[in-house]
Image (cartoon, rainbow, N blue to C red):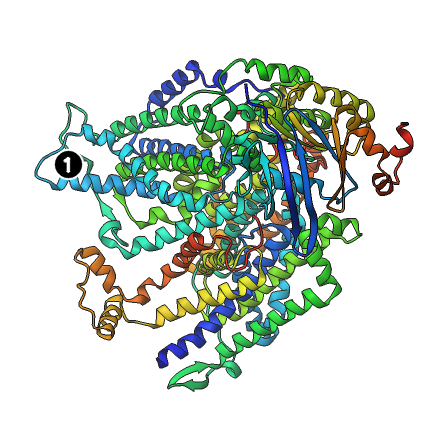
Amino acid sequence: MKPHLGLRCIGVSHAFGETQVLSDVNLVTIPGETLAIIGPNGAGKSTLFNLISGAHPIRVGEVRLGQQSLVGLSPFEINRLGLARSFQVSRIFSSLSVAENLRTAALWSRGVRYNFWHRVRDEATLDPHLTTLLETLRLTPKQAQPAGTLSYADQRALELGMTLAGDAPVILLDEPTAGMSRSETALFASRIKQLTADKTVWIIEHDMDVVFALADRIAVLVGGVLIACDTPDNVRRNPQVQMAYLGAWQGEAAP
Amino acid sequence: MNTPPIQARYGAMFWCLFALILVALPLPFPGAYALSLLSQMGIAILACLSYQLLLGQGGLLSFGHAIFTGSGGYVVVHALVLATEGAHTWSAAWLVLLPVMGGLGAATLAALLGWLSTGRASTPFAMITLGLGELVWAASFMVPEVFGGEAGISVNRLMTQAVGPFSLGPQIQLYGLIAMYLLGGAWLLIAFTRTPLGLLLNASRDDATRVAYLGFNPRVVRYAAFITAGFFAGVAGGLSALNFEFISSDVFSLQRSGAYLLFTFIGGSSLFYGPVIGGVLMVAGLVWLSELTPGWLLYLGLLFVIVVMFVPGGLSGGVTRWWQIRVREGWWFVVRAGLGVCAALPPTLGTIMLIEMLYHHALVRDGGVATTMVRLGVSLDVAQAANWWLFICCTPVLFWLCRRAWAGLGLLGDQGSQTAPSAAARPDQGGQL
Amino acid sequence: MELLVISLLNGLSYGLLLFMLSAGLTLVLSLMGVLNFAHAGFYMLGAYFGYSISALLGFFPSLLLAPIAVGGLGALVERHLLRRVHARGHVAELLLTFGLSYLIIELVQLIWGRAAVDVRIPDVLDGTLLHVYGYPFSVYRFFMIVVACAMFLAIWLGLTRSRVGLVIQAALTHPDMARALGHDVPRIFMSVFAGGAALAGLAGVIGGAAFVTDPQMAMAIGNIIFVVVIVGGLGSLWGAFWGALLVGVLQTLTVAVDTSFADLAQQLQALLNLNTESPPVALTARLWQTPMSALAPLLPYVVLVVFLVLRPMGLMGRRAG
């Protein structure tokens, strides 16, 4: 069993050329907590994920996975330390079958390295962990199908599955329900909750129902600045957040 | 469409059948010329199999594969020179191991050059391999002691001590050696694809960045594939050196690298059948076709362009897709396909005739050959304008008729589709085969 | 040292010719992500069209008409061939242009024959412009420099000052956005591809008269411009400029300079009063004595490898690849 790890950002700032995208973001989560990050488009949420997961180098501030600093590490090094992320636009291996996608995602966690003397693709069955994952995501009947031929929702499910296949203790989910219908979203959210029960999860979401269903706390990012980070109820009542969001959800969610 | 897993398609039955075919092939084709062609085809198939590891399995387009086939050949040639110039006469048994030495030499070179090349994939990789290939080729002319310069280096297999009747002198014995290496090489390469590294290679072909987010450095994956492909290319090159008993700097040329690319690509994305088709076509095209018609390079170029544009996944990929359609639509599809082929024959023949006329006309203009040419039993005078007008007018009409026929037969389904490219449509992605 | 100056000038003109060629290649690569293997083929076609049109109408009309013809051909290629393959990714496009390069060479041989054709420099451009330390610097070389500079200026102005140029720059990094704003991106692609081909054609007309025009000219210069594009950084126009100058000058210098390393080493030893021995191994000793001019063909690729090791993104590359 992997140890439980927390994730924290300390004074993280980032600029693309002249444009300041993130300013002094401080976020701490304890192991097992689910943090939702919300904010208008362009607020810097995906950039934050990119910094944490190693896509961009961290120049100002620090990110810590447990006790380990992630500054200067490449994406594969960060993943090996226990952080896995999903993508807003599904990044799956379209010519491989669904099962092989998951198998690939689980290789490192199984202790497999750049091994060319064992046979891994001849195994008739997947690990029980992956089989359960397939079932929960309702992908079992399609497991031999090439991933490129899946429907959009199934691809999002596979995307989530690949992120979770390695059993990483810290998960970053980037708009997992993007593009889904209302019913698909509700179902998917419950699956996410089920599958990430004991993990530290940071999730970027726009759908407030999902946010309230999953989040222990909510962080609100506007223009690269963290304007609130608190329990859902407190965030709802926060006047700054209400000002930033002239949107519908304020009226929807009755206190 | 679910495809059966690899082990079911390449099980014991497959290998027995393959071995049997290799053994039986020389029988219906007696004669030195046929045997020489078969030997060359075996070598070409092995070279294409090694190239397929990069292209089909890894999505890596290399323009420098000739570096490794060439260096394998040179290792073998120099080993043979060393062996036969000494006082001690080596046993022919050592000849059997020479291609492996060639492979190891090529793999070492791949290890040295590979880290430079595999930093990025796709276009930068192609360019870097192109540059390195040209560098090696140009450098080989600088050191005639090692590479033989323009004249090359000749060796003789027969300078070794025979072991019983086996001296590897007769072509049939060399064919046997080539067949064994082809069998072994194909088995190893297919086995490689079943390993974790093979899986990662396929994955990084589809999305190298995602592989990084799953804990693996895609550069290491590419590097490992580069070295492995280099090894088998070196084996093929070593066999080639043994076969021709000659090598020169020509083996490093861009033409060679281009040929591996061209024919492996035409052969298609199938892990095994692609290189088989590619290797056979390579020898058929470069050796046999070039003797038939002066337009052979144009035909090959046209074939290549047609395959790139209309047959994604190459010939083997095309066959797979048509087989899948047949499974869906039954044998009626085969009938329609057959009719489609018949409809395509007249315009194809017309185009061939036009091309032949063009080349013959060029020969007449350049060299004083008679203006009458004979092709496919038909005699044509290229000086007569009427012959030209006949083909220039008829061929487009025939193409148009063929297109109408194909539309009527329902064979034009996949082309012009606006949907996102399916998994089979990308030529740099290997199929499930 | 006099030889050095004249070689520098000649190298400059050759480098600028290389730039004329690689500019089109790099523009197409930046904009469309396609590495056009047939680009050198367009160069060759420009030379041959120039030859045929010159024979009919004279050199200066061919300077205008041949690039137009090649550009038109480029537009056709993009519209009917490349566009079909576009959806399947850059590798497919690259392969298509690779196949095309073979076809172009074969067609040229069919139409004009396998031997070199005689392309004459027009009388007004023939002869020596001036003498540099006693070495002649030809008018034609100067003409090459002028045309190349004019071309570069035209491209730069076109890209930065005109509306079309701005749209192209936008479509360079954000094709979908440009399309969403109503610009006809496929038409822009076709225009840029045709433009690149026309540039190559222009380079061909000029280069064909300066150097030999034969079916091998595409292969010969094709590899060099790939080196230029990589060294300059894939996708950067300024990078192509400096890369072309670097490669052009270096190549010309080494061909002209005839001392071998041994002589150089001896001169260096004499200069520094060193007393080292030459390498004992026969092979290295022979290499040491190779005249630098013989190493000239090797040089672009050595530069390539040096860059790959030290600066893989090239001089000014910004394309992630």
Residue B236: x %, y % from top left: 34, 35
Residue C171: x %, y % from top left: 70, 54
Residue in the image at 64% along x and 68% along y? C156
Residue in the image at 59% along x and 76% along y? C60
Q: Quadrant of the N terminus of chain A?
A: top right
Instruction: Tell me if mark 1 has few (under 14), some (14-19) or many (20+) residues whose alpha carbon lies within 10 angstroms of its own.
Output: some
Q: Nearer the viewer, residue A5 or C51?
A: A5
Q: Could you tell whether B61 is left or right of C163 in the image?
A: left
Toward the left, the furthest residue is: B87
- Residue type at mark 1 is Met
As drawn, A199 above or below B84: above
As drawn, C178 above or below C286: above
Q: Could you tell whether C308 is left or right of A134 in the image?
A: left
Please tell me whether mark 1 sits on a helix, a strand or a loop. helix
Q: Nearer the viewer, residue B172 or B351?
A: B172
Residue in the image at 23% along x and 47% along y? B153
From this viewpoint, is residue C119 visible? no
- Residue A215 is drawn in which quadrant? top right
Q: Nearer the viewer, residue C210 or A159?
A: A159
Residue B222: x %, y % from top left: 46, 37
- Residue A181 is drawn in which quadrant? top right
Residue B189: x %, y % from top left: 41, 27
As drawn, B304 above or below C25: above
Residue for badge 1? B159
Chain to which mark 1 belongs? B
From this viewpoint, is residue A45 visible? yes
